[in-house]
Image (cartoon, rainbow, N blue to C red):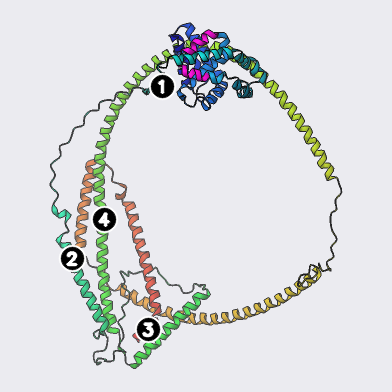
């Protein structure tokens, strides 16, 4: 009993390991045969025969066992699924070879309650002759199923019923028999390769750092200077708001320009407002710019009307100013001179500030070159250290590779020894496969004959259907119907008419629409002619205004040119001299450092690219100033007539 129990347990364990999606039956049997070499030859043959039969007829066995779990085995564990498959295979395919007595011993070696349930379900005549027979007939032929499997099972059915009744009596007489425990899932360790021992790195020398100073409290507090600046800023803003309010409420009498002998004008309505021109940062001598008024400019209608309205407003302002001068308004000549002096002073300050910025940029450039030289020296030292470390690592890697090659050679020798034992099992499997192939060839021939007969029948039916359709197509049909276009349909609707009348009315409607379109076209052409005449008059007026503005701009250009030639170069202040001295010191230090390191100067220090960069910088600066000068000329051209009257 214990012998059969051990054999069945081994078969069930191997069936649980089989995965039909990943494993092939032949390879699986080979691995099982190698693992069972420790057992006797008889036990090994019995286990392999039962296991190969369960794998071959697995579709038939799963049909019976699945139905058992659905109907009578609802309370059975799914862990016993493979056990029921093995019992079903022995009862169906091996009962004649084993003998009934040996089959009874195998059944009694297993749990009695489970075997009683399964045998009562499987050897039930209603189940065998009805649905089990039908399901197996879907896989194999009906005659083969009935002759080889169903009829032998029906012959053994009375003896199996006696075995079932005997098992029930044993269960009734021994109610205290210990029930078989359910299989408990036991965790297994992963078969992982042992990790390689890590090399012990050389401990790095821990640097001894100096004790840092504590962070001062002033880091987390605002400085007193910033607080004082905030208080001063608020005070100045409040004071400026008061001054602005007072200036808006009172009139500024001190800013009214007048001659020395002229008394103060008391009429506040006629006092002119101060007008400050735009401040110019720097106006160098630009001799390469020549205004060209001969270039034609194409304007659209909106631009022409907008420019005409602008010139009209300028003319009205000029007429108002002339009326004020006639009434006795003051002259702006003294104020304009003071304004020019202040603008010249502002320009000198801006030139000095620009020179300081340029020298500061040059100083930062020299400092960056020195920092780059120090960084190159540090990088060289680090590179030498890295090379030494890589040489040590490469030596360790070569030793490790030699050890791995030795272990791989030993593993290859072991694999070659195991392959020699596999050849014997392969010859046995080859014979089994040849028998299976012959059976499959015979079945495929029968299926091919059936399919050819079905295809011939289907082709005959198609030919009959095509002949019927062609006969229907050959029958004559009536194609059209005569229609009278002058006849009214007579449906009883309002406004009903014939097709001829409808065509005449449509022609009359099209003629009326064409006349309306011609009238509208004539009106649009007349409106366009009137607008074009107005635009032509506006363009003539604009051309006259432009000519006058061009003459005034030429006069102003000559004045500015004379002013730019007069004053000399701006004087050097203390900030510029100090920056130049610091730049010379940094350049001398850089040359000493380059001589010590025996390295070539960086690309930025070469004279040719540096000269090119400076030339490009000054070219951009001249272009920006040229654009500013053009903008100032356009602004000044708008107030040209007023300037001529002031000069007069």
In the image, residue 133 above or below residue 484: above
Q: Indicate the position of residue 454 as horizontal and vertical percent values.
A: 74, 29
- Give the foreground label among 2 and 3: 2
Q: What residue is pinned by disc 2? A: 229
> Dot 4: what SS?
helix
As rendered, which of 574 and 461 lies closer to the eye? 461
Task: Name the main secondary structure of what is drawn in magenta.
Answer: helix
Image: magenta residue range: 98-118
Tell me the number on the disc at residue 362: 4
N-terminal label among 4 and 3: 4
Q: What residue is pinned by disc 1? A: 183
- Give the foreground label among 1 and 3: 1
Q: Indicate the position of residue 193 as horizontal and vertical percent values.
A: 36, 22
Of the 4 image quadrants, the one containing the C terminus is bottom left
Query: Mark 1 and mark 2: span between their CA atoms?
Result: 86 Å
Q: What residue is pinned by disc 3? A: 642
Is residue 440 covered in magenta?
A: no
């Amino acid at each position: 009993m214990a012998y059969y129990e051990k054999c069945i347990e081994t078969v069930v364990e191997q069936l649980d390991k089989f995965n039909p999606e990943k494993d092939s039956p032949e390879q699986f049997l080979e691995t099982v045969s190698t693992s069972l070499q420790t057992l006797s030859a008889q036990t090994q043959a019995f286990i392999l025969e039962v296991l190969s039969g369960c794998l071959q007829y697995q579709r038939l066995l799963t049909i019976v066992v699945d139905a058992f779990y659905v109907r009578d085995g609802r309370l059975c564990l799914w862990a016993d699924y493979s056990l029921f498959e093995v019992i079903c295979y022995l009862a169906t395919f091996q009962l004649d070879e084993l003998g009934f007595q040996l089959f009874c011993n195998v059944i009694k070696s297993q749990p009695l309650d489970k075997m009683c349930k399964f045998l009562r379900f499987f050897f039930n005549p209603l189940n065998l002759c009805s649905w089990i027979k039908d399901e197996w007939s879907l896989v194999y032929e009906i005659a083969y199923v009935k002759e080889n499997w169903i009829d032998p099972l029906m012959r053994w059915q009375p003896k199996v019923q006696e075995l079932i009744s005997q098992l029930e009596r044993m269960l009734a007489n021994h109610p205290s028999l210990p029930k078989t425990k359910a299989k408990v899932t036991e965790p297994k360790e992963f078969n992982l390769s042992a990790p390689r021992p890590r090399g012990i790195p050389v401990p790095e020398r821990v640097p001894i750092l100096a004790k840092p100073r504590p962070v001062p409290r002033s880091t987390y507090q605002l400085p007193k200077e910033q607080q004082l600046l905030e208080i001063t800023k608020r005070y100045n803003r409040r004071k400026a708001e008061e001054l602005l309010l007072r200036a808006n409420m009172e009139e500024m009498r001190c800013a009214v320009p007048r001659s020395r002998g002229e008394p103060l004008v008391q009429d506040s309505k006629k006092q002119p407002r101060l007008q400050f021109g735009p401040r110019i940062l720097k106006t160098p001598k630009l001799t390469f710019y020549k205004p060209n008024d001969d270039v034609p400019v194409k304007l659209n209608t909106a631009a022409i009307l907008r420019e005409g309205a602008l010139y009209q407003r300028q003319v009205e302002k000029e007429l108002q100013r002339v009326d004020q001068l006639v009434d006795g308004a003051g002259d702006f000549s003294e104020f304009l001179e003071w304004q020019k002096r202040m603008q010249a002073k502002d320009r000198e300050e801006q030139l000095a500030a620009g020179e300081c910025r340029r020298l500061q940029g040059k100083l930062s450039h020299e400092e960056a070159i020195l920092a780059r030289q120090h960084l190159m020296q540090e990088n060289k030292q680090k590179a030498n250290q890295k090379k030494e470390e890589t040489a040590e690592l490469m030596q360790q890697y070569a030793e490790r590779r030699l050890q791995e090659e030795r272990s791989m050679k030993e593993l290859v020798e072991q694999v070659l020894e195991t392959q020699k034992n596999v050849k014997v099992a392969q010859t046995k499997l080859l014979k089994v496969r040849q028998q299976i192939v012959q059976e499959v060839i015979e079945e495929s021939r029968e299926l091919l004959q059936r399919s050819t007969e079905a295809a011939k029948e289907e082709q005959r039916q198609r030919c009959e259907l095509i002949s019927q359709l062609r006969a229907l197509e050959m029958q004559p049909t009536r194609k059209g119907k005569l229609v009278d276009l002058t006849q009214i349909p007579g449906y009883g609707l309002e406004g009903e008419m014939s097709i001829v009348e409808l065509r005449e009315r449509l022609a009359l409607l099209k003629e009326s629409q064409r006349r309306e379109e011609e009238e509208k076209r004539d009106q649009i052409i007349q409106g366009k002619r009137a607008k074009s005449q107005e635009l032509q008059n506006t363009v003539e007026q604009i051309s006259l205004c432009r000519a006058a503005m061009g003459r005034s701009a030429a006069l102003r250009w000559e004045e500015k040119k004379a002013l730019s030639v007069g004053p000399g170069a701006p004087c050097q202040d203390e900030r510029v001299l100090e920056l130049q001295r610091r730049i010379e010191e940094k350049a001398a230090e850089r040359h000493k450092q380059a001589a010590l390191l025996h390295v070539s100067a960086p690309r930025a220090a070469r004279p040719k690219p540096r000269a090119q960069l400076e030339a490009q910088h000054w070219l951009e600066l001249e272009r920006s100033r040229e654009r500013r000068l053009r903008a100032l000329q356009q602004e000044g051209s708008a107030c040209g007539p007023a300037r001529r009257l002031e000069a007069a």
